[in-house]
Image (cartoon, rainbow, N blue to C red):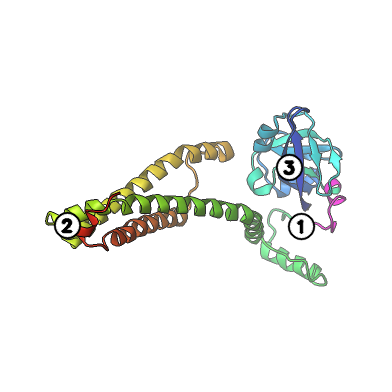
Amino acid sequence: MTPVVRTRTLATFGSSGSPQFRTYSAQGVTGDQLAETMDLAVLEGDVADVRGNTVALSRIAAGTLGVALGDSIDLRLGDGTPIKPRVVALYERGLGLGDVTLPHDLVLEHTTDRLDLAVLVTAAAGTDAAALGDVLRSAVRHLPTVQVNNRGSFIAAQSAAAAGESAVGLILNAVLLGYLAIAVVNTLVMATASRFREFALLQLVGATRRQVFAMMRSETRIIVVAAVLIGTLGAIPSLVGTSIGLTRTLIPSIPPLVYLGIVAVTALLGSAAIMISTRIAMRSQPITAIGVRE
């Protein structure tokens, strides 16, 4: 059985003249039975040594902080208390379980509510999981805030919590993409509207309005396809590098629906910006538009 308490930590690293700061999600656990209930994929050291003034770090956090097994790091717990624990283990699975693993009692003393997030229980070989779940639910029936979940439910709850924490980052990215979209649309509108004399000349030499619109639709398809291809190819190197750094896999994880949504928005913005500005640029009579100075 392993109690787990969650918190956030602030790590200080770099030279004393120009220190750098990084926040990490952290968990407090009892290390002696941790291997039976949580697989951190330990790379170096032993998580059973996480007790007293010690810490285990994920590979990514250790690389960022520039520390190795046996080094000490400067941390501040959730209430601002400074500590300087010694690194006793490095592990791989920091993305889902927290980049910093500290002794349970140390973390619990410096949280606001001083309550465990979860208590992980492993069943002995041959135990009926359903029966064990019924027994545990019966034992905590008098505690309305305590839930008994299986592995799948616990992972889903952790994923939902992580999604909530990343909401701020998603909002900031959405704002940035919004400004980028405005800049792209503005560029397309100005470039298309400035061709009003070209559209007038085409009509004066015999082209119909329908033919001009057909020409612009063809140009729009070329621009949209080129934007999607160049954008995709341009993003691949950074995505591959991030994937190698975080998960040590060459192929990045890209949700298909998200990618298709980006492509759809790109096509919609590009088509609307070009075709609407084309229609506006062709409002004047060709003979009048051809004589207007640019």
Circle 2 crowding by C-alpha within 10 Å: few under 14, some 14–19, many from 20: some
Would you place residue 42 above or below residue 188 in this image? above
Segment colored magenta: 106-117
Residue 209 in the image: state x and y as whole percent: 19, 61
The residue lying at 57 percent from left, 40 percent from top is: 247
Q: According to the image, label 2 marks what residue?
A: 203
Q: Is residue 50 magenta?
A: no
> Which residue extends farthest left?
206
Circle 1 crowding by C-alpha within 10 Å: few under 14, some 14–19, many from 20: some
Residue 243 in the image: state x and y as whole percent: 53, 40
Marks 3,1: beta carbons within 8 A: no
Q: Amino acid at mark 2?
A: Gln
* Residue closer to the observer: 141 or 16: 16
Classify residue 129 by image quadrant: bottom right
Q: Amino acid at mark 3?
A: Val
Residue 218 shows up from this direction: no
Q: Is residue 108 magenta?
A: yes
Classify residue 68 by image quadrant: top right
Q: Amino acid at mark 1?
A: Leu
Residue 61 in the image: state x and y as whole percent: 68, 37
Q: According to the image, label 3 marks what residue?
A: 100
Task: Residue 117: give its label.
Answer: 1
Q: Earlier in the sequence, mark 2 or mark 3?
A: 3
Disc 3 on helix, strand or loop? strand
